Image (cartoon, helix red, strand yellow):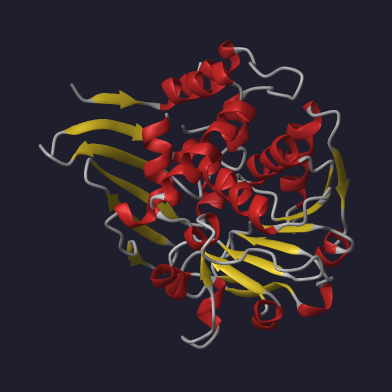
Amino acid sequence: MTRFLDVPATSKLINRLGTPRFLNELVDALHADYLRWDDFDKSPRVACHSRDGVIELMPVADSQMFAFKYVNGHPVNAARGIHTVMAFGALADVETGYPLLLAELTLTTALRTAATSVLVAKALARPESSKMALIGNGAQSEFQAIAFHTLMGIDEIRVFDVDEQATAKLMLNLSVFPALRIVRAASTDEAVRGADIVTTVTADKTYATIVTPDMIEPGMHLNAVGGDCPGKTELHADVLRMGRVIVEYEPQTRIEGDIQQLPADFPVTELWRVLQGKAAGRESASQVTVFDSVGFALEDYSALRYLPPATDPKNLFALLGKSSETEPEPALAQVEAIAFGR
């Protein structure tokens, strides 16, 4: 029988576990699958680009299960009152072709992206890291903040977004984490100054240079999440030249990542090689490291095997209710009310 995981069921599952536990277990699932990289049939995702956005199909399979995700990216949707990113996916049995699971993945994609960021940061960031800059305070931002706070001990996050309402939303949602200090910065430069980790999660579909070489300090780890399609970047090209660059799947990242700005022979290292111990991660305390994250189908496979429209499409975090580090299981009634529109 094919199972179906819809918005209410996904919200209930995450809330029963609590967001920190869900993220932690998802990091473990991702790690396990990256360690068996050679078992997977891999390819870059198929993308259909339009003036206002992109629609993508992301397939991957091992000898037992096939997974795919449908996902869009339309920054203009925020002004239309709908989500910028929406997704659904499926798992199927390879032997029979029979679909085993159909699932809504909008919320899960946000969580698996944050979990992947932490997985990489554990391998690349300095162990004593305690301060993070978070540039871009939209729908993905809370998940990044919670993941780095609860799983890596980040206790101060400096936030900035050109949309002041997005920052206000972020600060309100994260106020339930009393041990996490949120500092509102007046600019990207102010937010980045003195940070151990810099996370960029912006949505504008343009060649952008949100982080420039003058902002980089020795030992920083950059987690560049927002540049994820052709013509969309966040880091100045010289920032990439300053550090060691880690990618998920090189053939896809060459097309979509920040490294699209650089020659095809610019050296990068795939994540699986670092996790398997076949390549170094951070080589010194002063080295600058960069995770050029575009999102890869294997991460959706991990999320699907592990195992929602909100009233405010720029506040995806609201689907989880009022979770906190002291309240790992928020009231389901609130989540159900949002998910069902009650």
Splitting the image into 4 quarters, where does residue 52 fall? bottom left
Give percent across and percent down for residue 243: 69, 75
Res 145 quadrant in image: top right
Looking at the figure, which quarter contains the N terminus? top left
Q: Residue at x 64, y 16 (%)?
A: 330
Residue 210 screen position, x and y as percent? 71, 70
Above or below, comparing residue 64 to residue 135 in the picture:
above
Do we see residue 255 in this rendering?
yes
Would you identify the image quadrant in which residue 289 lies? bottom right
The answer to whether 51 is drawn above or below residue 144 in the figure is below
Q: Residue at x 60, y 43 (%)?
A: 314
212 vs 24, nearest the viewer: 24
Residue 79 as seen in the image, left or right of residue 35:
right
Residue, far left: 96
Closer to us: 98 or 51:
98
Q: Is residue 127 above or below residue 305?
A: below
As drawn, is 282 to the left or to the right of 29? right
Q: How many marks?
A: 0
Residue 132: percent from left, percent from top: 79, 52
Q: Residue at x 60, y 44 (%)?
A: 139
Point out residue 256 in the picture as x, y percentages from the top left corner. Answer: 46, 70
| Residue 82 in view in this figure | no
Give 64 or 298, whichever is nearer the viewer: 64
Residue at 65% x, 73% y is 244
